[in-house]
Amino acid sequence: WMDVCLSRRRAGGEIQLPVAYLTCNFASPTGEQPSLLTHHDLQTLFHEFGHCLHHLLTEIDWPQVNGISNVEWDAVELPSQLFENWCWEDELLSRYAHHYQTDEPLPEDLKRRLLRSHRFQKALFLMRQLEFALCDLRLHLEYDPDRPADPRAVLAAIREQIAVVAVPEWNRFLDSFSHIFGGGYSAGYYSYLWAEELAADAWQAFRERGVFSAEAGHAFRKEVLAVGASRPALDSFVAFRGRPPQPEPLLDSYGLL
């Protein structure tokens, strides 16, 4: 996870540069073997480093609205989710994924299978996220303290509408859905999927220009990372992408187009 140490600000006529720290839970070295990262570890590292860059590359001098501070809840994950995409790029894997002793590259067959796994059951995952987001929104939007609805009945109705695989009646997932009761995502669980849509659309811009395009990188830094919450996140996205977000890049990333 990432957190703020110092924020950018003007102090005594000078600029205090931002500082962030990244806390990792990777496997420790053992004997003569160094700490080795799994591909999942790599995704986590890139994700949290996206948050770090959002904080470090700000050009706003007011801590209340620079970096990640007070960025809308459904957009603050844009940089972090965007950065995860590089972990699935063949060109990046070919550069770094080498055996730590022999320096041999990742075998081509293993790499192909790894990349194919990225889309495994993605459509089911998408429907699951829609189910959770709809349940969260309806529980909060439709709540009537005088005539409270049965939460399990609300979820059952949503599942009847969109679920691909039937869920047994005895399932009590909702009883442990801590995100929307004590995890800070009340009426906001949809933000996971919305931020992923923003990230997929932003990633398409890199795919169009080249995944290591300096032009695309500078544009993302200028229009998104540098401005933080000094303007609405949607305005920043449109300034970078040249248009409002669209669902097609997300569906394409899931292999559904």
Image: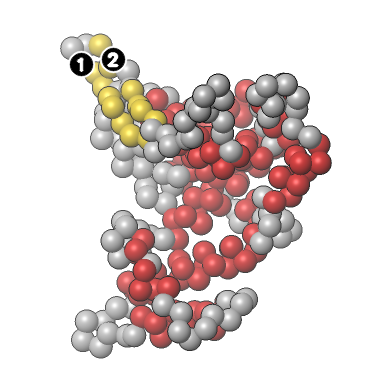
Other-residue count near label 1 (Cα within 10 Å), few / some / many at <14 / 14–19 / ≥20:
few
Outermost residue on the right side: it is 109
Label 1 sits on what residue type? Ala
Outermost residue on the left side: it is 12
Numbered tag placed on residue 227 in the rendering: none
Q: Do the residues under discs 2 and 1 have CB atoms within 8 angstroms? A: yes
Residue 79, visible in the rendered structure? no
Measured along the vertical axis of the image, is residue 189 above or below residue 103?
below
Point out residue 54 in the picture as x, y percentages from the top left corner: 42, 32
In this rendering, would 101 be left or right of 82?
A: right
How many numbered tags mark residues here?
2
Residue ID at (53%, 32%):
220
Q: Quadrant of residue 128?
A: bottom right
Point out residue 195 in the picture as x, y percentages from the top left corner: 49, 50
Label 2 sits on what residue type? Ile
Point out residue 57 in the picture as x, y percentages from the top left corner: 42, 25
| Of the pair 90 and 238, the residue shown nearer to us | 90
Point out residue 173 in the picture as x, y percentages from the top left corner: 42, 73
Q: Which residue is mark 2?
A: 15
Measured along the vertical axis of the image, is residue 101 above or below residue 228?
above
Residue 96, visible in the rendered structure? yes
Residue ID at (60%, 46%):
201
Other-residue count near label 2 (Cα within 10 Å), few / some / many at <14 / 14–19 / ≥20:
few
| Of the pair 154 and 170, the residue shown nearer to us | 170
SS of the residue at dot 1? strand
Residue ID at (33%, 22%):
18
In this rendering, would 254 be left or right of 47?
A: right
| Of the pair 178 and 145, the residue shown nearer to us | 178
Q: Which residue is mark 1?
A: 11
In this rendering, would 59 be left or right of 223?
A: left
Outermost residue on the front side: it is 31
SS of the residue at dot 2? strand
